[in-house]
Image: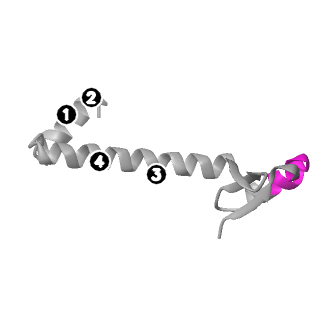
Amino acid sequence: MPQIIPIKNLKNTSEISDLCHNSEEPIFITKNGYGDMVIMSMEIYEQTMKKLNMYRELEISEQQIKEGKTKDAKQALTSMREMYDL
């Protein structure tokens, strides 16, 4: 379950840092009872960005399949080996 804290609690920076590092989810910050910001540890941020990039790549791949822009596996592996000098 996501954690929600008021903005006035941001004064306790060490406490907030510990909270972010002990939580596997973002922390939602409210101001005057309304959502204002989201904070998270760098580790969770990086994991989230990796997932987002993976989903973006999957969307591109699915679109390429629909458009018939595909290669056979042997051809794709050959071009990857050439590209990365493998």
On the image, numbered disc 1 is attached to which residue?
79
C-alpha span from label 3 to label 2: 25 Å
Q: Are marks 2 and 1 in contact (CB under 8 Å)?
A: yes
Q: Quadrant of the C terminus?
A: top left
Label 2 vs label 4, nearer the camera: 4
Percent position of residue 33, x then y: 76, 56
Q: Main secondary structure of the magenta part?
A: helix
- For disc 3, the marked residue is 51
Residue 42, percent from left and from top: 67, 46
Compare residues 30 and 75 and report the one nearer the observer.
30
Q: Which numbered circle lies on residue 59? A: 4
Q: Name the residue type under label 3.
A: Lys
Mark toward the viewer: 3 or 1: 3
Comparing marks 3 and 4, which lies closer to the viewer?
4
Specify start and end residues of the magenta stretch as a single range: 9-18
Q: Is residue 19 above or below residue 41?
A: below
Query: Which residue position holds label 2?
Result: 83
Mark 1 packing: few (<14 Cα in 10 Å), some, or many (20+)? Answer: few
**Element under disc 1:** helix
What kind of residue is marked 2?
Met
